Image: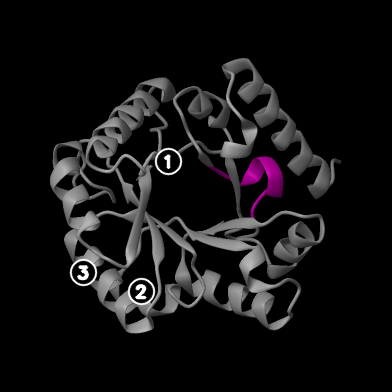
Amino acid sequence: MTSLQERLEAVQSNIALECAALKRDPREVTLIVVTKNHSVQLVRELISIGHRDFGENRDQEAAPKARLIADENLLERNLYNWHFIGQLQTNKVKSVLRYADAVHSLDRESLLAVLQKECLILDRKLDVFIQLNLTQDDGRGGLSLDQIESFTEQVLASSNLNLKGVMGVASLDAEPAKDFELIANASARVQKLAPSANQISAGMSGDYLEALKYGATHLRIGTAITGNRQY
């Protein structure tokens, strides 16, 4: 059975090889290890072997985990990053802002308003990604593609939010390349309004190499590194 470090290094090697083939600099790619449904011990182990970026999608799990890591003083706080990658309810914003360095799931005006309000109160900046809904299901999280420009302008008007780019999830019942192309096109539209918002959060354990071909800069990888989740 492979160890956590071996799985991490295997993914890092795959990323480096794919970037070389694409003539991309692997240093422009952020590998976010998704630690949801795993204990804080797994985060400790990853930190001990040098990993620095972690993703969580539920505040009720992420908040105590992040607090334990901070209280243990394993590292200076500015040397590791928490990425909130799940759908964020407005009543959880205050809690999430206590630990999150970036929110990848900004997808509606009500959430935008609360994030901006709370960041102003805390006098802090927050990195955000606009989450896209690539389906026809309005009930799923994410912004519809026809709203990209208007919502981008609203985010840019929020002084305490730093728009990094877009986030999307490839569907399970279609070719990932088709969805990654949609995400890349949406990124290009955002960059016409905000040239520096050129980052793409896309790609998971089963499709991250394909995502790299379409410009992904933030890969959200769980089981390929962490193993089976502990439910």
The residue beneath circle 2 is 93
Q: Is residue 191 above or below residue 84?
A: above
Q: Residue furthest top?
A: 21
The residue beneath circle 3 is 113
Q: Label 1 amino acid? A: Gln
Distance, label 2 to label 1, CA atoms, is 23 Å
Q: Is residue 122 left or right of residue 71?
A: left
Asked if one can make out residue 227 in the rendered structure from this viewpoint, the answer is no
Q: Label 2 amino acid? A: Val
Q: Nearer the viewer, residue 26 or 44?
A: 26
Q: Which span of residues is magenta-colored?
A: 219-229
Distance, label 3 to label 2, CA atoms, is 11 Å
Q: Label 3 amino acid? A: Ala
Mark 1–mark 3 contact, CB under 8 Å?
Answer: no
Q: Nearer the viewer, residue 152 or 172?
A: 152
The residue beneath circle 1 is 199
Quadrant of the snapshot with the N terminus: top right
Sequence-wise, the earlier of marks 1 and 3 is: 3
Q: Is residue 60 left or right of residue 161?
A: right
Disc nearest the viewer among 2 and 1:
1
Mark 3–mark 2 contact, CB under 8 Å?
Answer: no
Q: Is residue 104 above or below residue 192?
A: below
Q: Is residue 131 left or right of residue 75?
A: left
